[in-house]
Amino acid sequence: MSDSRLEDATLHAEKLVRDERLELPIDLMALAHSRDILIEAKPESAKGVSGMLLQVGNNFAIGYATHIKSKGFQRFSIAHELGHFFLAGHPEHVFKGGKLMHESHAGFGSGDQIELEADHFAAGLLMPSHLFKAEAGKYSDGFTAIEKLAERCEASLTASAIRYAELTDAAVAVVISTGPTVNYCFTSSAMRSIRGYKHPLKGSLLPRDSLTRAFNQTDSNILSARREDDSADLITWFRAEDEIDAYEEVLGLGEYGKTMTIITAEFSDED
Ligand SMILES: [Zn+2]
């Protein structure tokens, strides 16, 4: 039930993009302006709060957090708040009981259904599938595509990577990790259809011999946003039954304190 609500939230945003004939990068300020929504940067906000939606009389205002400097993160936060404005039932829900302010935790880290719906709306708004796929087709699979798409959409690398895994035809996995541990993993349908595939669970250990595991042993790799790549083994990463050539690209995410790994399979001998 909840899954189709999440998908609907993405579709709602994509329809908005088409109806309003928006182009990449989506101009959130203009969209908000067209609905008389005021947007303001909040220099200080409670830790963990990404943004807020306020009701001011009959109008709405959005405040977004600036403690994380990434423009992509800030845009995702604004798009999340726009989700609470545009999605059916959201204004009623977030302002129920006469509340005048809703504080958000954007970025797919929340377990709350309403927050997740707003996250899916944000992903669909900043990275609508029709524009995103057309753009993705211009680049080679893996990290290059993710990086170019993040630039083009003015989205964070992480958001771009997650969306890429969702929409690409390539066999790709995006793993976010800290130290020896998997924080979360998103994979494309082509990767999931590899024989024997087992999904790395949240909290599980990174493969012992992986580049990522070695990379994470040096803190400065993460802080200085170091980048490394090497061939990868899908048997140890995903319990694949067959040996398939793959590539592992690793990037330290700086102040975010985590590491992003992109694993791309190459099917040159098959099909
Ligand atoms: Zn929210």
Image (cartoon, helix red, strand yellow):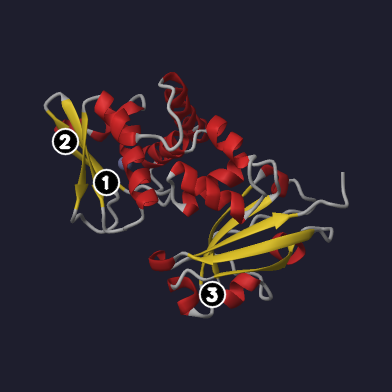
The answer to whether 30 appears left or right of 180 in the picture is left
Amino acid at pointer 2: Lys
Q: Position of residue 17 (x, y in %)?
A: 44, 26
Q: Quadrant of residue 9?
A: top left
Q: In this view, does 162 lie above or below 260?
A: above
Residue 33 shows in this picture: yes
Give the mark nearest the N terminus, 3 or 1.
1
Where is mark 2, residue-wise?
99
**Direction left: furthest residue:** 57
Inspect the image, locate mark 3, and give the three-letter code of the amino acid beneath it: Asn
Spatial CA distance of label 3 from label 2 is 43 Å
- Mark 2 or 1: in front is 1
Which quadrant of the frame does ligand 1 lie within?
top left
For mark 3, does the 10 Å Cα neighbourhood hold few (<14), some (14 to 19), or many (20 or more) residues? many
User: Position of 264 compared to 30: left or right?
Assistant: right
Left or right: where does residue 92 sit relative to residue 206? Answer: left
Q: Residue at x 61, y 39 (%)?
A: 167
Ranked by sequence position, the earlier of labels 2 and 1 is 1
Residue 264's image quarter? Answer: bottom right
Query: Regarding mark 2 in the picture, which secondary structure is present there?
Result: loop
Q: Are marks 3 and 2 in contact (CB under 8 Å)?
A: no
Helix, strand or loop at mark 1: strand
At a point 31% along the width and 41% down the height, the residue shown is 78
Nearer to us in this view, 232 or 70: 70
Per the image, the residue denoted by label 1 is: 51
Residue visible at 48% across and 38% down? Answer: 127
- Identify the residue under disc 3: 216
> Tag on residue 80?
none
- Residue type for callout 1: Gly
Is 70 or 188 nearer to us in this picture?
70
